[in-house]
Image: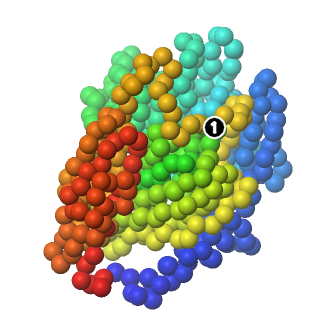
Amino acid sequence: MPSRSQEADLKERLGGRRVLARFLGGPRILALPSVLALLLVIAIAGCLLVSFSLSATPALASQCTLTILSGRAEIQDSGSGSWGEAGDGVVLQAGSRVRTGPDSFALLTFFEGSTIRLEPDTDLQIQRLESAGAEGTVIALQQWLGKTWSRVVQMADPGSRYEIQTPSATALVRGTLFEIEVAETGLTVVRTIEGLVSVTAQGEEVSVAAGHEVRVETGASPSELSPVRPSENALMFAVSAPAFVSVIDPTGASIGFLPDGFSFNQISGAQSTSPSDGLQVVTIPDPEPGDYFVVMRCVADGLIRFVLEGFRGGESVFTHYREYRLSDGTAWVIPVHVEVVDGQSMRAVVGQKAPLGDRMPEKIVITRPVEASPVPVHPSDEPGEPAGTEREYVLALVSSNGGCVSAPGQGLFSYRTGSVVTLVARPDPGCDFDKWSGKVTDPYSPVSTIVMDQAEAVMAHFLCASQN
C-alpha cells in the first residue's frame, strides 16, 4: 500500500494544480494531447458540420476524419505503397489505410456520425464511403489486424450498411456497439455490447446479440455463440440532474452527452444511460490506470450529486460521493486519478472541480446540424402515451468504507414509478451506520425507504473507530 507521503502527494496532485494544469493548459505537461479544441464550422453535403480538431492547420471534415487520441498513427493513401505520419484532423477517402503504433489510440469519424476506435497496433483500411441519399449509406472497412470499437448510428434506410471485413469473416450492422479483434493468424472475435451484429464466414451467417461473441478461424465457419464474460473490474460514474456528463479516459477517448443531445462513445465496452431521466450513469469496464476527467455541463440551477464507485474482482473497493450546488450555463471538470495497488486492488483520488469555460476537451467530430434543443432533464410522458403511463427509473446505490447496502444491494436497479424501495445499510464489525445521502424517508435510520418518482443516487455513510 502507498505510504502517507505518497497518499498526500496524490491528493495534492488532484487538489487542482498539477492534474488540472495538465488538463486545462500549461507548457509541455498536458495529460491529454490537446490544449484547446479548434471549432470548425463547415458547410458540406448540405449540412452544417462542426469539427473539434487539434490540428494546427484545420482540415475540412468530409468523408472521414482521423483523430489522434494519443500516441501516433500512420496513413497510406490509396494507390501508394508508402506510409507517412498521420496528422490529427486529416480527412481520409476510400482506399486510405491507417495503422496505430504501440500504446497509441486513434478514432475515425464518418460523415453520417458513426465512429470506430483503433487500439494499439491496429491496421484498418477504408474500402467504401458512399452516401446516395434515398438509396442509403455504405461504409465498408477492412480490418487486417488489431482491435477496434465501433459505435454505429442507427441506419433508417434499408439500403444502408456498416460493414467490416477481416481475413476470416465479415461483420454487418445497422446500428450498434461492438468490438472486433483480429489476431496475426487471422482469427476474428466479434463481441456485441448493444444491438445485433451479423457475422458471415464460409457462406454461413450467425446473428450475434448483445452480450455474446463469436470466433472465426481462417477458412472456417463461425463458432457457436458464447456469452461475453462480464468484466469484474469497472468504474461507475453516476451524476444527477441538472448536469450532462462526459468522461475522458487516460487514452484521450471519451463517452457522454452534450446538452443538445449529441452522444458519443469512444471507450471500448463502455456504456452511458441517457441523462433525460435525471441520473446519468457511465460505466467503464477494465479501466486503464491513470488520469480521468469528468466534465459536467449544467442546464439549470440545482444540487448535483456525484458518485464514483470502483469494482475489482467483482467487489466494490472504493466509493466517492460529492455534492455540488451549481448554476445554469456553467461547466466544470473534475480530475480523478485511478491506480492499481499491488496488482490487485484499485483506488482513486477525486480532485477539486474547476471551471471548464468554453473549452471542448472531448475529441469529437459532430457531423449533423447543431441545434439549440436541449434534452429535457425530467421529461414528461412520451408523445402518444396515455397520461400517467408508468415509467422506470434508475436507482444507484453505493456506500462509503465501513459497510454496504445489503438490501436491495449495491449497484444499479430499475423500478417503476411510485415503487417504494426498502433500503438496508449493514455496517462492518467495528463500524456504525451514520446516515443516507439522497431522498430517503429517514436519512438517519439504517433501515429506510425511498419512493421512486425520479432517478436517484443514494449513498450509505458509515463511521468506524479508526476514523474517529
Residue 154 figure quarter: top right
Q: Position of residue 394 (x, y in %)?
A: 37, 42
Side of 322 where 452 appears, left or right? left
Q: Who's the residue at 52% across and 57% down the image? A: 303
Q: Position of residue 306 (x, y in %)?
A: 46, 59
Taking 394 as reference, is 409 above or below it?
below
Side of 176 where 362 appears, left or right? right
Side of 411 where 94 appears, left or right? right
Taking 244 as reference, is 97 above or below it?
above
Q: Who's the residue at 81% across and 39% down the image? A: 41
Whether residue 233 appears in this view of the structure is no
Q: Nearer the viewer, residue 231 or 70?
A: 231
Q: Nearer the viewer, residue 257 or 222?
A: 257
Q: Position of residue 144 (x, y in %)?
A: 52, 38
Q: Secondary structure at mark 1?
A: loop
- The quadrant of the rendering that contains the C terminus is bottom left
Whether residue 134 appears in this view of the structure is yes
- The quadrant of the rendering that contains the N terminus is bottom left
Q: Who's the residue at 51% across and 56% down the image? A: 304
Residue type at numbered disc 1: Pro
Taking 200 as reference, is 284 above or below it?
below
Residue 320 figure quarter: bottom left
Q: Which residue is mark 1?
A: 374
Residue projecting furthest to the left: 429
Q: Position of residue 27 (x, y in %)?
A: 74, 73
